[in-house]
Image: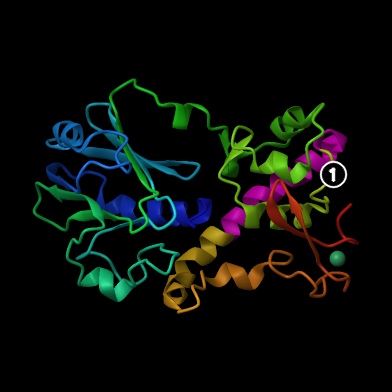
Amino acid sequence: MPELPEVEVTRQRIGPLLVGRRIRSVATTRPSYVFLTRPSALRRGLVGRTVRGLARRGKYLVARLDDGARLVIHLGMTGQLFSAEATSPRLLSALARSALTPEAQRRFRPDAHTHLRLGFEDGGPEVFLRDVRKFGKVLLLPSGGSHPRLDRLGVDALELSGQALFAASRGRRVATKALLLDQAVATGIGNIYADEALFRAGVRPTRPAGSLTRRECMTLAESVPAVLHRSIETGGSSIRDYVAPDGADGAFQDERRVYARAGAECYVCGARIRRLLVAQRGTHFCPTCQR
Ligand SMILES: [Zn+2]
């Protein structure tokens, strides 16, 4: 499932293929739960508009249009946003087995899973949203409009501050990991990155959030963007690997220090990495390095 780093890599790479271009045509699949905005309304709202910017909020991509409206896209489990002709083999983030390989993207012809297809006035390459499992979402927000899905998001994980984390943790008995996964506290910290950030900060995932010191919150708030940025950096170079039949999702997995390493030796102290469930999520930590 694409997490924040993969969505950010997608943003960085598809941005140049959207921004500054005027939409001439919009084709969609039939109305379904992918479309939070009906296809007919999407067509009316998008044709003739120019994309002014592509931002990311948590795991949502937000394209700003010249009339102030915003096209919001969530990639769900298997969503891919790409452009066939201008897409180099390494251009895209795609992490599921049902995803198209880079080679398949280059010779791509829209299929039954291509839920959104944007054509442009410049006659250049189209942009496609393809999603086999249909957990993705497409939403068009009119100028000034809002939607609960966006409204309830907390600060982006890359901008998490120690002060904010400290404030959010006061009086909370939930496990620190659960606090990190709470999208109202910070949006976009996935399971892998929560475990890695906690290791980096030396904080045990089960610690009651309210017991964190201010200093620990500062360290943790630095660790979260650090692991995310590192994954974003490796995302680009790792794209080639994702086509591996085992679903390998790139170079960052080689840098994981606790996630999916239960029973293996800690790289720092040699103790065995442990695994347990926290907030119903598989959670990995070093019993010595994390307190
Ligand atoms: Zn250790």
Q: Is residue 185 above or below residue 127?
A: above
Taking 156 as reference, is 139 left or right? left
Secondary structure under the numbered disc 1 in the rendered image = loop
Q: Quadrant of residue 228?
A: bottom right
Q: Quadrant of residue 125?
A: bottom left
Q: Is residue 255 magenta?
A: no
The residue pinned by badge 1 equals 207
Q: Which residues are magenta?
A: 209-230
Residue sitting farthest toward the top: 144
Q: Is residue 172 above or below residue 3?
A: above
Q: Nearer the viewer, residue 184 or 281?
A: 281
Q: Is residue 89 above or below residue 20?
A: below
Q: Quadrant of ligand 1?
A: bottom right
Q: Nearer the viewer, residue 202 or 177?
A: 177
Q: Position of residue 67 (x, y in %)?
A: 22, 27
Tell me the colour scheme of the image.
Answer: rainbow
Q: Position of residue 243 (x, y in %)?
A: 42, 75
User: How many numbered marks are there?
Assistant: 1
Q: Nearer the viewer, residue 66 or 153?
A: 153
Q: Residue at x 29, y 70 (%)?
A: 88
Taking 262 as reference, is 80 left or right? left
Q: Residue at x 80, y 37 (%)?
A: 209
Mark 1 Cα within 10 Å, few/some/many (few <14, many 20+)?
some
Residue sitting farthest toward the bottom: 245
Q: Quadrant of residue 210?
A: top right
Q: Position of residue 262 (x, y in %)?
A: 76, 69
* Residue type of the residue flagged with mark 1: Arg
